[in-house]
Amino acid sequence: MTSVMNETDFVSLLRAHSQRYHDQHPFHVRMNTGQCSRRQIQGWIANRYYYQENIPRKDAAILANCPDVEVRRRWIRRITDHDGATAGEGGIEAWLRMGAAAGLTREEIQDHRHLVPGVRFAVDAYVNFARNRPWVEAVASSLTELFAPDLMVERLAAFQRHYQWIEPGGLAYFRARLEQAPRDCEHALEVVTTHCLTIESQALAVEALSFKCDVLWSLMDAIDRAYPG
C-alpha cells in the first residue's frame, strides 16, 4: 500500500501542478512580451471580468460548505477583498477601473456584451466545483495562486513597458494582488496540508488543483480564439 506523502513532497507536488498554467499559455506569453493589440488586451480585460466577479461567489460556496469556524474567519476576507467593504472598493472595482483605463466603459464590461461562451462555461464550471465538491478540495483548487505573486510582478512590468496607452492608475488591481495573493495562498496551503493526511485526500487535492488549471487554460483558449492576432 502506498504511504502518505510527507508534507514537503506534497507541497512540492502542488507547486509543480500550480505552475502548469500561469506563465505558459500562448496568449499570456504574447501579452507579457508586448505582442498583443489594443483589441486583444481589451478583450482579455472584458472577458476576465467574468472570472473576477465570480470569485466572491466561489469563495462564498467554500464558506457555505466549510464547518471550521477558524477557516471561515480567515477565508471571508477574500470576499471583502474582491467585493470591497463599501462601494468603490475592492478587486472587482479595481478591475472595472483597469477596463476604463484601457478604453472600455463600465457598462460594456458589466453587461457581458463581449463575453465569449467558452469563458462563461469555464468560470461557471469552477463555481459549480466549489459548490458541489468537498470544501477542502475547493480550497486546494485555489492553489493556482502559489505563483500569482510572480505572475503579477511580471504582468505589471509588462503592462508598464508595452501598453503605455493604458492609464497607469488602472493597474492598481495588479499592485493589490502583490500583497493579497501571498497571504491567500499561504492560508490555502495551510488548510490543505492540515486536512489532507491520507494518500487519497492528497490525490484529490492535486486533482482539484489540476482541474482549476484546466479551467484557467480553457478560459484563455476561448479568449485566444475570440481575439486572434
Image (tube, rainbow, N blue to C red):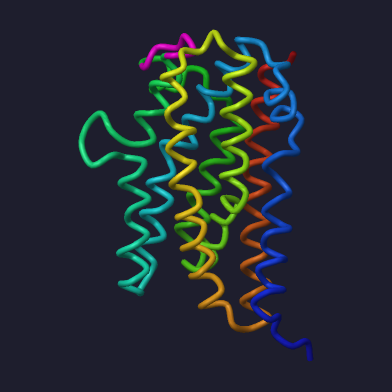
Q: Residue furthest left?
A: 86
Where is the C terminus found, in terms of image quarters?
Answer: top right
Residue 146: % across, % down: 60, 53
Residue 224: % across, % down: 70, 24
Say if the magenta span includes residue 95.
Answer: no
Where is the N terminus found, in terms of image quarters?
Answer: bottom right
Given residues 97 and 227, the one toward you in this image is: 97
For the point 42% across and 37% down, the residue is 176
Given residues 183 and 61, the one toward you in this image is: 183
- In the picture shown, does residue 226 fall above or below 203? above
Q: Quadrant of residue 162?
A: top right
- In the picture shown, does residue 84 fall above or below 185? above
Residue 12 located left or right of residue 67? right
Say if the magenta span includes residue 103.
Answer: yes
For the point 49% across and 33% down, the residue is 174
- In the picture shown, does residue 18 fall above or below 111? below
- In the picture shown, does residue 99 fall above or below 11? above
Q: Residue furthest bottom?
A: 1
Magenta stretch mostly in which secondary structure? loop
Q: Quadrant of residue 112?
A: top left
Residue 57: % across, % down: 38, 47
Residue 158 located left or right of residue 61? right
Residue 44: % across, % down: 58, 23
Residue stretch in magenta: 101-106
Q: How many marks?
A: 0
Q: Quadrant of residue 62?
A: bottom left
Residue 137 located left or right of residue 58? right
For the point 44% across and 14% down, the residue is 101
